């Protein structure tokens, strides 16, 4: 990044925003752009929308920048190169495959490494909170775990902060639960006694799970009824 002119990058970002080119994906915080110029391979996250929606996305990007700043130097986390103009988050591009569909050379070793990485995040005072999402854990070279997208992460504040500390501890448990779910592909009956010590389903997850199951049941019932009445 030292050899990259930030003014040139900023001009490239603004041109891409204007022309809507180089878009790699659409995320919760806005658009994700791929910058591949002069040997640099970067991800640029930008807020989208207008008014309150755009303001909220900028706040989320600033929060993500704080998380990456805490995690500087941690193996398994993309390098962060700054928050240009206070709104454009610039990150290292990781050449990997989402864990749910990636070939993994040694699953036991991979998940041991992922658990160590999650503990490193927590040691630095960052809880990811969204590791169950399919694209947030990458596999590099079929063996090395990388954790991406800290948009909803909680950065633990020092000193007195009961709400912040509560949310941090909650998301920290989300991370460990997600690790168990990923390792066993959701088949919790196969979880070993050793790994079961990391899994403690929170009240939030129980309620959200009930809502999801109820929604899917209603959706399935509605589809059956449409099929039955549509064939009459």
Image (cartoon, helix red, strand yellow):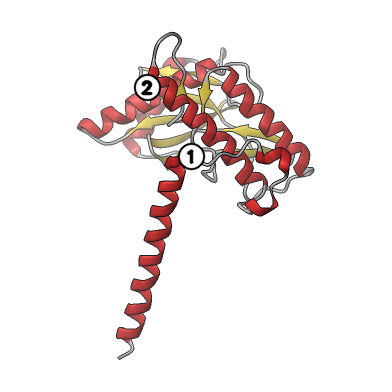
Answer whether residue 37 is visible to the viewer in this image. Answer: yes
- Rendered residue at 33%/30% (across/down): 57
**x then y, percent, for residue 215:** 37, 60
- Rendered residue at 40%/27% (across/down): 13
Q: Residue furthest top?
A: 159
Question: Is residue 138 left or right of 20 when viewed as pictured?
Answer: right
Q: Residue furthest bottom?
A: 232
Answer whether residue 10 is visible to the viewer in this image. Answer: no
In the picture, the disc for residue 202 is 1
Q: Find residue 20 and report its image quarter.
A: top left
- Rendered residue at 38%/30% (across/down): 46
Question: Is residue 203 left or right of 114 when viewed as pictured?
Answer: left
The one nearer the camera, 5 or 142, is 142
**x then y, percent, for residue 133:** 51, 44
Q: Find residue 50 and report its image quarter.
A: top left
The one nearer the camera, 156 or 71, is 156
**x then y, percent, for residue 167:** 42, 27
Quadrant in which the C terminus appears: bottom left
In the picture of the structure, the residue carrying the numbered disc 2 is 163
């Amino acid at each position: 990044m030292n050899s990259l002119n930030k003014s040139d990058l900023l001009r490239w970002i603004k041109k891409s925003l204007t022309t809507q080119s180089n878009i790699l994906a659409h995320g919760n915080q806005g658009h994700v752009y791929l910058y591949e110029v002069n040997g640099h391979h970067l991800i640029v996250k930008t807020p989208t929308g207008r008014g309150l929606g755009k303001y909220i996305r900028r706040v989320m990007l600033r929060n993500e920048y704080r998380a990456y700043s805490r995690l500087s130097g941690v193996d398994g986390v993309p390098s962060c190169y700054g928050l240009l103009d206070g709104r454009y988050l610039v990150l290292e591009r990781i050449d990997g495959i989402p864990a749910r569909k990636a070939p993994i050379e040694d699953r036991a070793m991979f998940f041991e490494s992922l658990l160590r990485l999650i503990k490193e995040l927590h040691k630095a005072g960052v809880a990811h909170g969204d590791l169950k999402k399919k694209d947030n854990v990458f596999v590099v070279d079929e063996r090395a775990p990388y954790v991406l997208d800290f948009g909803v992460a909680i950065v633990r504040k020092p000193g007195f902060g009961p709400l912040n500390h509560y949310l941090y501890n909650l998301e920290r448990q989300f991370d460990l639960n997600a690790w168990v779910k990923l390792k066993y592909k959701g088949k919790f009956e196969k979880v070993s006694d050793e790994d079961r010590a990391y899994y403690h389903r929170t009240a939030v997850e129980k309620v959200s799970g009930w809502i999801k199951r109820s929604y899917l049941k209603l959706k399935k019932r509605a589809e059956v009824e449409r099929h039955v009445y549509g064939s009459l």
